[in-house]
């Protein structure tokens, strides 16, 4: 099936989300749509899937213009979609989820689940994996749930499959398996539209790449294009993907965590006997798949979460018994994982958010009264220094884009001398340009002599920033390795394999992305520490 | 994972820091990656969302609610008017009669309401013509003070229903100090005011402490405390200390303990009204210009973020409820030392509940609360005259108040009626435009 989008336009009020977008997806092609957050990728796919009605343009299938008034029409036309957030009923079995909405019945209204089971088994087999049709969705891993979604789409005779940011929730190894499944789908003639902002994946598997920026198609690229080229197209200017940083000069320990144990509200042990040290002047990245105890660990360090056992020291001083206020006063800066729930007060102005944890101190206030003029000056300065894009410092922070919100949080946390900066997911949801800026500021904080603990689920970020990498899995610290560790080794460690074993296994079998890494950067196969992309290398690549 | 593992990465030379100007496109909803569903995040409580919803509505909503309430009131006036009903019998023969009579009934009623609330053009003396206005201000005084207190807790994210108990406790303490002590002029009033404030603050701090220490929900505890205080008041009035010639009524407050009248003995308006305006200013300063207010607002707007920024949510809970109690206690002082001069079982009326409406109608802001308090004072004062002159039921005013409450509690309905835009949509638009 050949799918064409001609001049698709979609506006929300005065905001043009899609501006005359043209796209052709050939049969059996993996077509990547690359764009930053907010570029209009998801809007375009929602138009294609019948969720939004386009304001202009048409969808053409095999030469025939079609109009969808809902996802049902799109499905009937052979378009399937796997959403970023899965549309599965957690308490239903795999087979039940597959038949949901297209239930075949037998006799007196009984579900023909046997046919569904057979369908699940056959489809899975043809794609080279197996799945238990009677397993309940809630018992499956995220990667398995995603496969159920793919099977579900295929069971509705999808010939074009839309995958919306499918790798955002997967471990590197799961990503690898997904890539293999995509390969088999392609071989069987299914076209795939692959939405992503991850350059590495695009280069590894796409046949064609369309780049969208600010709602417009800004170009198409060959999979052989370099990441820097792709990134530049995506952002609209040349970008530096690597983080330029001098070697770390670790000093005195800033943070020492000893045998920390944390239980969650249900009494489950979520941080298991973790010991970790972060020295001043170094960046330690805590890598791991989301939900493996990193959140609880950082909350314990800040003091917002409870600890069951263990000791936390800041600059050699035991802070385990201190409150949040005292810990912040002792020189800790904290960038929370979820900025909208914990980092900012959305209704507060930029000015107010910039002093959220400083407001009680001089010169921000005196004798309990806010020093309004100083707060305003402070806001003007910070907004300039951190390049927060806003029309006014009085604007509620909730009206800013995510990148600018994050800059406000960073500006606040970095506006006093720090011994330790703990930053969770510092660039989640940010565009390439903002990521570059945030990374630079974090490195600058390190070079000022602060210890930095980064928690990130993005391996790219971990590899770009870390002087040392600590990997967490299932509440346990799997190991601490060097900043330049092999991507595949880290992936295996994130699944709980100890460092030594992971190295052996990774040497035997490289993932697709790992291969792509090696090809792109042949030196790293010899020297395990990858060189940051310097301007010179960018020149060479061109 | 030992020190040996640590190695300095061999890094290339540090090239000059290049221009760090990032492009900043908007990050609209659908594209922003979220945490996977398996990870539960603390969500804002229902209470908080309801409060937010109510307070984020625009001024237009408030005005719309008042207008709509008057329309509903008009219907009720028509239904209660016998002459209008008579014209209904021959509505299709002469519809003009019906409309003329309707107009007469409605305009008479609302004119009487205005005359009773603001300026009585029918009164014989100039003094009596302006008396309605002073009555409105007098009735508004305790409503404003209690509304300020409740609005403060609402902004701190607490649904404080306990205004009534805070007023009652304040009134008990203040009235006792007022009739039991003998103090010089000036000092005595101050002592009474302080006593009321303290009594109210204690009544507020109790649910605050229960919430901070044990997590007891403030809606439950404050409502329970309202009942407790009601029966405590009845018991207190029966004790020897509060006994007077009349059963269930305390002795009269000493004249030194009463709030001075502003316009002489012909009017009930007392110094408390000025105090209420001053309190409004102080509350504004506290919330907008002080560190304490900043913290209360931060906790109210985003508890998680406030906690992460090192603020004590527990402290904020106790402090804001105690402050609310302090202001409600002063509202109690307006009654015992301002207008009643004695403590009775019905001294607080329903002011503690009306003040909730006043605070919400005023969108929890001091200026809004003053205006809403004045409106409610005017409605109460005008309702009496309306009943006697236009024959409309005095309860109509209660209905108007109730309809206003319902309408502010349901902004989508008012928006639909007046075709106002949804604030959420406006916000989204603003983001998009900003991008």
Image (tube, coloured by chain):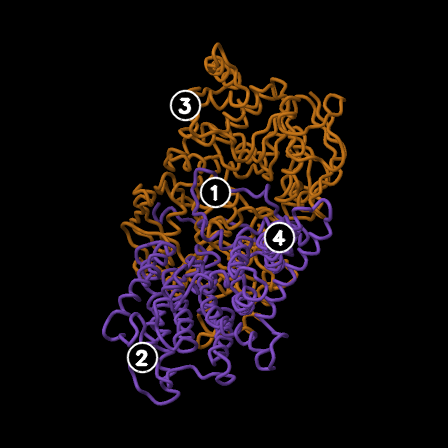
Chain colours: A orange, B purple
Checking the image for residue A135, the label placed there is 3
Label 2 and label 1: CA atoms lie apart by 65 Å
The 10 Å Cα crowd at callout 4, few under 14, some 14 to 19, many 20 or more, is: few
The residue at which mark 4 appears reads as: B427
Residue at the far left: name it. B240
The residue at which mark 1 appears reads as: A457
Label 4 and label 1: CA atoms lie apart by 31 Å
Residue lying at 49% horizontally and 55% vertically, measured from the top left: B51
Residue at the far bottom: name it. B184
Mark 2 belongs to chain: B
The residue at which mark 2 appears reads as: B177
Sequence-wise first label, 2 or 4? 2
Label 3 and label 4: CA atoms lie apart by 43 Å
Residue lying at 73% horizontally and 21% vertically, measured from the top left: A62
Mark nearest the camera among 3 and 4 is: 4
Count of labels shown? 4
Can you say whether A47 is above or below A150 in the image? below
Sequence-wise first label, 1 or 3? 3
Q: Same subunit under labels 2 and 1?
A: no
In the rendered image, which quarter contains the C terminus of chain A?
A: top right
Mark 1 belongs to chain: A
The 10 Å Cα crowd at callout 3, few under 14, some 14 to 19, many 20 or more, is: some
B341 or A469, which lies in front? B341
Q: Is residue B6 left or right of residue A425?
A: left
In the rendered image, which quarter contains the N terminus of chain A?
A: top right
């Amino acid at each position: 099936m050949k799918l064409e989008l001609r001049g698709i336009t979609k506006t929300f009020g005065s905001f043009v989300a899609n501006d005359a977008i043209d796209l052709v997806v050939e049969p059996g092609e993996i077509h990547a749509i690359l764009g930053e957050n907010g570029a209009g990728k998801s809007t375009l796919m929602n138009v294609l899937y019948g969720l939004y009605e386009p304001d202009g343009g048409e969808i053409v299938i095999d030469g025939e213009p079609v109009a969808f008034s809902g996802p049902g029409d799109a499905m009937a036309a052979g378009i399937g979609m796997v959403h970023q957030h899965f549309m599965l009923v957690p308490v239903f079995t795999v087979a039940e989820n597959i038949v949901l909405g297209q239930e075949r019945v037998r006799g007196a209204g009984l579900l023909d689940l046997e046919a569904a089971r057979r369908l699940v088994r056959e489809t899975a087999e043809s794609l080279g994996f197996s799945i238990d049709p009677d397993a309940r969705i809630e018992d499956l891993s995220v990667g398995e749930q995603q496969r159920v979604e793919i099977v579900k789409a295929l069971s509705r005779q999808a010939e074009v499959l839309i995958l919306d940011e499918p790798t955002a929730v997967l471990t590197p190894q799961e990503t690898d398996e997904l890539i293999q499944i995509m390969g088999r789908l392609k071989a069987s003639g299914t076209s795939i539209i692959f939405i992503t902002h991850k350059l590495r994946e695009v280069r590894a598997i796409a046949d064609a790449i369309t780049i969208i920026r600010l709602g417009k198609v800004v170009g198409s690229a060959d999979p052989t294009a370099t990441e820097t080229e792709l990134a530049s197209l995506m952002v609209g200017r040349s970008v530096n993907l690597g983080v330029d940083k001098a070697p770390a000069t670790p000093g005195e320990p800033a943070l020492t965590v000893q045998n920390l144990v944390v239980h969650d509200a249900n009494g489950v042990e979520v941080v298991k006997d973790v010991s970790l040290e972060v020295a001043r002047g170094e960046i330690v990245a805590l890598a791991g798949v989301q939900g493996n105890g990193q959140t609880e660990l950082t909350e314990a360090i800040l003091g917002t979460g409870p600890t069951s056992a263990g000791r936390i020291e800041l600059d050699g001083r035991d802070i385990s018994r201190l409150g949040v206020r005292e810990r912040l006063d002792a020189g800790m800066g904290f960038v929370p994982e979820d900025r909208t729930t914990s980092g900012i007060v959305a209704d507060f102005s930029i000015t107010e958010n910039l002093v959220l944890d400083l407001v009680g101190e001089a010169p921000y206030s005196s004798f309990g009264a806010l020093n309004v003029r100083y707060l305003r000056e402070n806001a003007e300065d910070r907004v300039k220094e951190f390049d927060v894009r806003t029309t006014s410092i009085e604007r509620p922070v909730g009206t800013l884009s995510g990148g600018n919100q994050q800059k406000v949080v960073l500006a606040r946390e970095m506006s006093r001398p720090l011994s330790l900066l703990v930053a969770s997911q510092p660039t989640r949801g940010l565009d390439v340009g903002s990521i570059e800026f945030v990374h630079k500021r974090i490195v600058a904080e390190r070079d000022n002599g602060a210890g930095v603990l980064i928690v990130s689920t993005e391996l790219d970020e971990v590899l770009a920033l870390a002087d040392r990498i600590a990997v967490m899995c299932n509440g346990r610290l799997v190991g601490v390795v060097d900043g330049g560790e092999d991507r595949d080794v880290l992936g295996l460690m994130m699944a709980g394999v100890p460092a030594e074993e992971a190295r052996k296994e990774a040497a035997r079998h490289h993932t697709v992305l790992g291969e792509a890494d090696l090809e792109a950067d042949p030196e790293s196969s010899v020297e395990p520490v990858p060189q940051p992309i310097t301007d010179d290398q960018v020149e060479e690549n061109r | 994972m030992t020190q040996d593992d640590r190695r300095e990465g061999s890094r290339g030379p540090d090239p000059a820091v290049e221009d760090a100007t990032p492009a900043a496109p908007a990050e609209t909803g659908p594209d922003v990656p979220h945490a996977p569903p398996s990870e539960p995040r603390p969500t804002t409580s229902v209470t908080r969302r309801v409060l937010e919803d109510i307070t984020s509505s625009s001024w237009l909503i408030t005005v719309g609610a008042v207008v709509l309430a008057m329309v509903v009131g008009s219907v009720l006036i028509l239904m209660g008017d016998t002459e209008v009903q008579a014209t209904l019998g021959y509505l299709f023969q002469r519809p003009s009669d019906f409309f003329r009579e309707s107009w007469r009934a409605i305009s008479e009623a609302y004119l009487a309401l205005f005359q009773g609330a603001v300026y009585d053009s029918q009164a014989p003396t100039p003094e009596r013509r302006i008396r309605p206005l002073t009555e409105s201000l007098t009735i508004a005084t305790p409503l404003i003070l209690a509304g300020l207190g409740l609005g403060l807790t609402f902004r701190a994210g607490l649904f404080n229903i306990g205004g009534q108990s805070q007023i009652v406790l304040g009134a008990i303490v203040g009235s006792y100090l007022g009739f039991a002590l003998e103090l010089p002029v000036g000092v005595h009033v101050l002592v009474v005011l302080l006593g009321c404030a303290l009594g109210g603050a204690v009544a507020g701090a109790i649910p605050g402490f229960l919430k901070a220490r044990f997590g007891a929900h403030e809606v439950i505890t404050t409502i329970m405390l309202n009942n407790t205080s009601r029966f405590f008041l009845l018991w207190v009035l029966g004790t020897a200390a509060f006994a007077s010639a009349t059963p269930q009524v305390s002795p009269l407050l000493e004249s030194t303990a009463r709030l001075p009248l502003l316009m002489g003995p012909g009017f009930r308006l007392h110094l408390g009204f000025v105090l209420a305006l001053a309190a409004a200013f102080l509350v504004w300063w506290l919330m907008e210009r002080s560190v304490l207010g900043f913290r209360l607002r931060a906790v109210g707007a985003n508890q998680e973020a406030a906690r992460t920024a090192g603020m004590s949510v527990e402290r904020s809970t106790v402090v804001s409820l105690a402050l609310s109690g302090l202001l409600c206690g002063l509202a109690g002082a307006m009654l015992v030392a301002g207008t009643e001069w004695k403590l009775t079982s019905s001294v607080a009326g329903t002011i503690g509940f009306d003040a909730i409406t006043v605070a919400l109608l005023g969108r929890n802001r001091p200026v809004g609360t003053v205006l809403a308090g004045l409106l409610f004072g005017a409605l109460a004062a005008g309702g009496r005259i309306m009943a006697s002159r236009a024959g409309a039921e005095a309860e109509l005013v209660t209905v108007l108040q109730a309809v206003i409450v319902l309408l502010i509690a349901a902004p989508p309905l008012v928006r639909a009626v007046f075709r106002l835009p949804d604030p959420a949509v406006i916000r989204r638009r603003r983001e998009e435009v900003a991008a």
